Image (cartoon, rainbow, N blue to C red):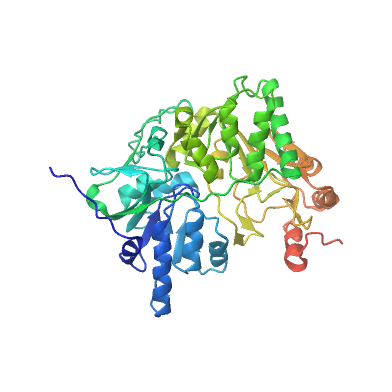
Amino acid sequence: MSPIYFPRISAEEAASMIEHGQTVAFSGFTAAGAAKAVPRALARHAKELHARGEPFKLNVLSGASTGKLDDILAEAEAIAWRAPYQSSKVLRKQINEQKVEFTDMHLSHLPQAIQFGFLGNIDWAVVEAAEITSDGRIYLPASIGASPTFLRSAEKVIIELNRYHSVRLSEMADVTIIPPPPHRSPIPIYHPLNKIGLPYASVDPKKIVAVIDNNEPDGIAPLGAPDEISRKIAHQVVDFLLDEMRSGRIPSEFLPLQAGVGNIANAVMSFLGDDPDVPDFYMYTEVFQDSLLDLMEQGHLLGASTCSLTVSDDNLQRIYNNMDFFTPRIVMRPQELSNNPGVIRRLGVIAINTAMEFDLNGHANSTHVCGTDIMNGIGGSGDFTRNAYLSIFMSPSTKKDGRISTVVPMVSHPDHSEHSVQIVVTEQGLADLRSLGPKEKAKKIIDNCAHPDYRDYLHRYIAESPSGHISQSLRNSYDLHNSLLENGTMKFWE
């Protein structure tokens, strides 16, 4: 049988094949491994068509956020619908103006939703690869995400062959697609570094219509140094985990950790590594961030399962320059495995995530401002929170120079219920909500976590609210939010 040779074409030629109204699934889980050349060409193509008065908008899928990809396409007004997560300021504005439809989803649910056609047909998959073979083996770069599912489900495939990435990333990859129910066996991951799949994704080579050559970094900027509030929150979390370990509620060998994206989570991981009383540990998480490199090289982080290497370009090169060290210690999986509820529960993962606000019952809002405007989406936080051994949510107690309290009577959008949120933390303190009834829970959240400027109001709210099992006033529960919308501050008493 003769080998199949894939045509090499330009990104512009590839973009010209994609039609208005089609659904395109792009690789990427954060900017790591995101398609690059084709989205830029699509944006230029869209602008040219729009200038001639012709429509051009796409339905866009990816594993999670994509860095510049969303910015570029949104600026060209080339997105009609988007799922499951985004972090683009430009796209966010269009979503909140209802110019773009957005479906917010738990990231572990995405591959199954695609597999069963819940999101419609996938016309194109545009997937970045570090290497490709003629029989359809796709060696993925710095993220796995949902690319294996995109490759299987799409009618046509375009590969961006990016020579910037090390082909040795395949040594970290653990790629498998979970079969559909009711034919699923237990997932045999019993340790964060267990591998159960292959080092590559697969695609029917007949579906590959083109390969575009590229040599470009992911373009991930380094995170800033932790500020004073992040450091205080991090200390609270570390002290709590050590107390849990000393009490015997965390085993002496510790438990695998998950940490969300951002400076606060990065600070927590750094402080865990700095504390000599914290034993060396593993991670079962969805993103591998900058702070973890130092921890791994120092021996504090023994190994990590992840979906993507969401590290700055300099730190990615640091990994590539020392692959003999990193490849045995990092496993990269598709998001339906990195975020799998059953594996998270089995391993006893401690989930550490950030929230926009939480209320006196313990509900957390990760996604919407004042209940209407989305920021990014729920991402993987729900996958971990609901199934974690311990679920921790962190936030500064106030934002916007104190005009916003992140502790409110009732969250404006509930993403994580009181039944899943166990620990809430601000720079003011930590509230352990386990075993507490509603009255005790509200008091502890106010006294330990709320900013002093808002404590009197919150105590008064509880005291004056109608009382059943929960003290809650439907008439007054959003007084803080309404004041913010009307006056630019939640401090309506000033």
Which of the 4 image quadrants contains residue 431?
top right
Residue 45, x across and y down, in percent: 39, 69
| Residue 437 drawn above or below residue 405 | above
The residue located at (36%, 37%) in the rendering is 176
Report the front residue among 178 and 291.
291
Count of picture labels: 0
Q: 197 or 319, which is in the foreground? A: 319
Give the residue furthest to the left. Answer: 1
Residue 256 visible from this viewpoint: no
Q: The C terminus appears in which quarter of the rendering?
A: bottom right
Q: Position of residue 472 (x, y in %)?
A: 74, 51
User: Front-most of 418 and 148?
Assistant: 148
- As drawn, is 48 to the left or to the right of 294? left
Camera sees residue 378: yes
- Coordinates of residue 485 in the picture (x, y in percent): 72, 66
With respect to residue 250, does 492 lie above or below?
below
The quadrant of the picture occupied by the N terminus is: top left
Residue 178 position, x and y percent, is: 36, 38
